[in-house]
Image (cartoon, rainbow, N blue to C red):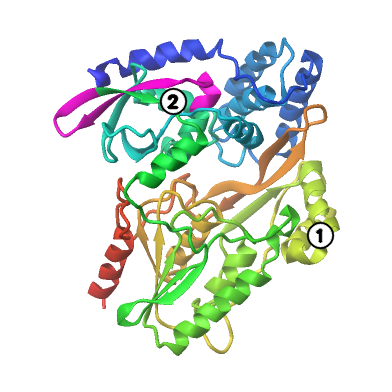
Amino acid sequence: MIKGIRTVALALIGLLLLAAAPPASPDSQLYQPAALRADFEEMYRRLKGAHVDLYAFTPKAEMDQAYAATLARLDRPMTQMQAQVLFQTFLARARMGHTRIDFPHQAWSAFRAGGGKAFPLVIRPVGSRVWVSGNMSGSDQVARGDELLALEGQPIGAWLSRTGRHVSAETTYMRDSLLEFDFARLLWLEIGQKDRFTVTLRRGDRTFDVALAARTREEAAAFAAAQPPTLDLDTPMRQARMLRGGIAYLRPGPFYNAEAQVEADMYDARGFIAFTDKAFEDFIAARATDLIIDLRGNPGGDNAFSDPMIAWFADRPFRFFSSFKVKVSLEAIAANQARIDHDPVTAGDVSQIYARLYASAKPGDIVDFPMPQAQPRTGRRFKGRVWLLIDRQSYSNTVSVAALVQDYGFGKVLGEPTSDMASTYGAMERFTLANTGLSVGFPKARIIRPNGDRRSRGVTPDIPIRSPIVQTPADEMLAQTVAAVKTRR
């Protein structure tokens, strides 16, 4: 029955969204319609000038129509958060992960800190089905691994579409991977706070309804702590160790300086390089024959971090693209110069390359990014076999690393397909709107993976390993990876 009514429900919700308004927010300043319209007009105008290909996935006529409809809705005062939500739902129409205004984290944090209640389940969409992967409701009627069929009497697929309209993503697979962690807060954007939710679940052959209390942050944390333990891949964030049988294990963590105290220092790669250099020295000293590099859940970052890691096992010069086309714009020039002005050292060589490139071109030009190939290390290198473990939560530069290793034949890729793209619209920059101060992200470059495949798709593993729907303390994917390594000796 749920499957049969899904199409009708989606159509009805689509009509309701035309009149939906973003929820109230804790910030008190109101922006008048004239200021909101000026910012929205500025945003679209600057995107058309700075974006490398704004209409790659959504035709210009469709974007223009959505622009006109959104502009007409800016007819009343709004808070910054309300404008942020409305502007982002327009940007999400472009269907690009790097074309976005980020979620209003500050407003959400204030809501939760003030005792705000939220949907108490964590979901995991897999294909056309949705599962409960986390239960913070306190109800023993819900178990991790139950299939979630409906919410508030509406098919769960309709709710994925409704909350997913806030998400910038190239594919439904990518959207759903983001909803795994964002569903509760995006649901809050859609319907505000509710005290109770009714869900329809299926366990085996039994289908049943459960009423769940919405939970505060503290309640959710307490109920989550009472659940059976699950695998924690974030502690420690970076890890290097030897497994049995001559297999080394490296979890490099994000390809940026996650330990930085200020945002501008996020691109200081010195600490990361020191960590990976020591790890490889230790692996070589331990006579490791195989190396598993764990990139699951890795948000990505910059190749100034990943290239020195790859150089330890690369056997020839490499780079993460076969084509890298950059659109020159005043916005990209300003963002790059701001990094250099803050600190030329932490901005790195890439920012200087951009600066020289921009100086030799004019806004509107699309030019080749002249990044030289990275070189393998001279002297000591890791000469064993390399295996990369990925999942749908491997994003951005992490996907480029997996594509590079796969395309150059430096190693094998295991796991599940990435939801982020291997050939992408990326190298994201930002500009700030004059009135609301909203920060708008846009891709300045079209980047094609090393093998030249231009299709918008993720990295497909050489050896598929499915991520479990319900995590246990045991690392099932790593265990299967180790088994795969041993059977291929």
- Name the residue: 48% across, 61% down: 235
Front residue (pair 341, 251): 251
In the displayed structure image, the side of residue 341 where residue 449 appears, left or right: left
Q: Measured from the top left, where is residue 171 in percent x and y?
A: 45, 37
Q: Which residues are magenta?
A: 187-208
Q: Amino acid at mark 1?
A: Arg
SS category of the residue bearing label 1:
helix
Q: Measured from the top left, where is residue 265 in percent x and y?
A: 73, 59
* Label 1 CA crowd tier, 10 Å (few <14, some 14–19, many 20+): few
- Name the residue: 51% across, 36% down: 217
Q: Is residue 137 above or below residue 469?
A: above
Q: What residue did someone put label 1 on?
A: 356
Task: Tell me if label 2 and label 1 are in contact, CB under 8 Å.
Answer: no
User: Can you see residue 85?
Assistant: yes
- Name the residue: 81% across, 42% down: 330
User: Can you see residue 373?
Assistant: no
Q: What residue did someone put label 2 on?
A: 161
Tell me the quadrant of the picture where the C terminus can be found: bottom left
